[in-house]
Image (cartoon, rainbow, N blue to C red):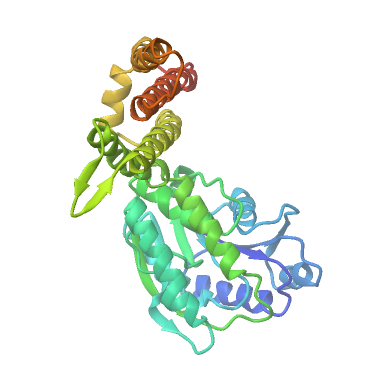
Amino acid sequence: MKVSVVMPCLNEEKSVGPCIKAAQIGLKSSGLAGEVIVVDNGSKDNSAKVARSAGAIVISESRRGYGQAYKTGFAASRGKYLVMGDSDGTYDFREIGKLISELKKGQDMVIGSRLLGNIRSGAMPWTHRYIGTPILSWLLARLFGVKVKDSQSGYRAFTRDAYLRLNPKSTGMEFASELLINALRKKLSISEVPIDYYPRVGQSKLSSVRDAWRHIRFMLLYSPNALFIYPSLIMLFLGIPLIITLLPGPIYFNGRVYDVHLYILGSLLTVLGFQTFSLGLYAKTYAYYQGLEGKNKFLTTFYRCFSLERGLLFGFGVALVGIIVGGLIFYDWAQSGFGALSSVRPALLSLVMIIIGTQAIFTSFFISLITLYRDE
């Protein structure tokens, strides 16, 4: 068995049969032995019956989801090469040979690119072609370095070994993005070939806003730097200078007075920045010890130097300075007979340091908890 063609199916009785026939033609014309697997994802029509009649292996999967259907289909497949594509008539499975030939040349994954090929009239809404797909492809490139023209094409092929290394977990539409992200992290080779893209048969199951958000959400969750680290560093780089500059008193610049209100903003940004940085550190620690970060030299050096004791020493040191500053403020207040308290800036500094110190203590404990059972 050389090739396994897997198609998810949800109420596609009008199109699933022609898709199967096209796949069979594509396999035969390429001289490839193969199988066509249709994963029925809860169809209420005669899709399963039509698929069996057309010669496909039909597998029922009650758990809904684009990614779930594919994972079930690939688990049941037997081919050396795996091909995925929708059963709604949008992809021409007679072009299977294009994808397989690239795999035979040594590629790990091949994407049938709609944007490099011919998009038939009415096949793709202009919002998808000129807004949705380019934006998602741009995000993949910026966040993960995935540089493909058509990142959202559902017509792909990969070797079985590559798929096993990809080990996708997603159950929804973000499955397509996960395959590309994991391919990059595993340093797999990816190529694109132009394909024809046709108008779908029947009613679309896509929800543009919901499915786009699922992709974006997945990419952010897979990228602790973009979600946590970069925003936290921006907040810290804005907040700390404000605290240092305004601690002695107000600043007069260009005819304006910058006083305690800006100092409060700096304090807020500093606290939020450190807390967000801590969340990013949790996420990166988990990813690092799950093997999702690859060979990250910075993280390797950090975890080699990090210990619970050093983290606690830093946290207690910062908190102690904050407590001492607060104690001095209280002492001055007591000496004045507990009258009006005007030490707003030192009081905010004390508060910020106590919060950051306490956060550092618990961050150190949590990181140590994550790494407790790591392989030495």
Along the viewing direction, whichever of 85 and 76 lies nearer the viewer: 85
Along the viewing direction, whichever of 269 and 329 lies nearer the viewer: 329
Q: Quadrant of residue 364?
A: top left
Farthest left residue?
254
Residue 261 x %, y %: 37, 42
How many tags in the picture? Answer: 0
Q: Quadrant of residue 322?
A: top left
Identify whether 214 is placed above or below 195.
above
| Residue 159 appearing in the image | no
Image quadrant occupied by the N terminus: bottom right
Left/right placement of residue 336 relative to residue 73 reads left
Residue 121 x %, y %: 50, 90
Along the viewing direction, whichever of 109 and 44 lies nearer the viewer: 44
Residue at (46%, 52%) from the top-left corner?
219
Identify whether 310 is placed above or below 137.
above
Image quadrant occupied by the C terminus: top left
| Residue 303 appearing in the image | yes
Left/right placement of residue 339 relative to residue 252 reads right
Residue 92 x %, y %: 52, 77
